Amino acid sequence: MEKNNLAVANAVKVIKRFNFKSPDEIDFDEIANTDSVKIIYDYLKSALGKIVISSGVAVITISKDIKLETRKRFTIAHELGHFYNERGFQVNDKLSYTCKYDDIFGNYSRNGREKNANDFAAELLMHTDWFVNFTKGKKFNYKLLKDLSQYFNVSLTSAAIRYSEIGQHPTASIFIKDKKIKWTVINKFFKYKFIRINSNVSNLSYVNDHLNGKEYPTEGEEILAEAWFSEDFNLKNRNDRLFEIVIPFENYDSALVILLSK
Ligand SMILES: [Zn+2]
């Protein structure tokens, strides 16, 4: 999935303008106070975040029901994404978004403006330079994923997707809902490319075990490449293996899978 360059540039601009040097320096209050944004916490029916932009001034409402700090941060960053990406082109003087879980965390590829807000959020929270510096020379595994999530104060899922986008080790992130493959981020170093969207998860995979309530290796385990890439014409050796890490979601019908290849 291609990043929206403008959204990424907008996030970099914020980082430079506020002179944030590392993830722990990101200060939402400072951003909000400087740029006429008000951030409030309130009850939101079935949404995580909301933004109303009017005459260049914005009110962001974040759901009081969000318990996870990482989710709260990503939601604020997402709403700021709407603000910086779109404040310039309000046609009717008022622009408003109510962002649900799927807009921010589930439905990664759809709806241009939601995706652009996510691209902004990913760049703001996990700025490319910081991410490359942090991962340089490190082997990708479950431990690195945990370290990334801690350092950037983001969920394991966000860290994994980001790694698939800009990490140096061959990785693929695959989002699964209702036992079907919904979207993938496969980086350029990964040896297989083709997974059919909306196909069923193979019963050879560990994520299938997890989704069926069975035990699965929490820090990952080797798996036959065939379990994921049986339709890829690059798969010539049926014994070829990948490494599969399952990241369960809170809502038990979804999961993220990270695959590593050599
Ligand atoms: Zn949104």
Image (tube, helix red, strand yellow):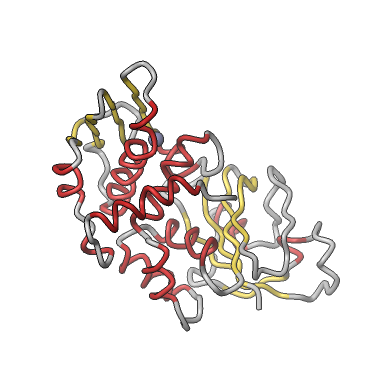
> Residue at point 42% right, 64% down?
128
> Residue at point 36% right, 16% down?
92
Q: Is residue 76 above or below residue 61?
A: below
- The residue at the far top in this view is 92
Between 198 and 219, the one lying in front of the other is 198
> Residue at point 31% right, 20% down?
94
Residue 39 placement, left or right of 224: left
Ligand number 1: quarter of image? top left
Residue 111 placement, left or right of 149: right
Q: Is residue 35 above or below residue 143?
A: above
Between 219 and 61, the one lying in front of the other is 61
Across and down, in percent, residue 6 comes to 46, 45
Across and down, in percent, residue 175 comes to 56, 51
- The residue at the far bottom in this view is 137
**Label total for image:** 0
> Residue at point 37% right, 47% down?
10
Between 35 and 46, the one lying in front of the other is 35
Residue 248 placement, left or right of 192: left
Between 178 and 216, the one lying in front of the other is 178
Across and down, in percent, residue 253 comes to 52, 44
Across and down, in percent, residue 85 comes to 39, 38
Q: Quadrant of the C terminus?
A: bottom right
Q: Residue 47 is drawn in which quadrant?
A: top left
Q: Residue 58 is drawn in which quadrant?
A: top left
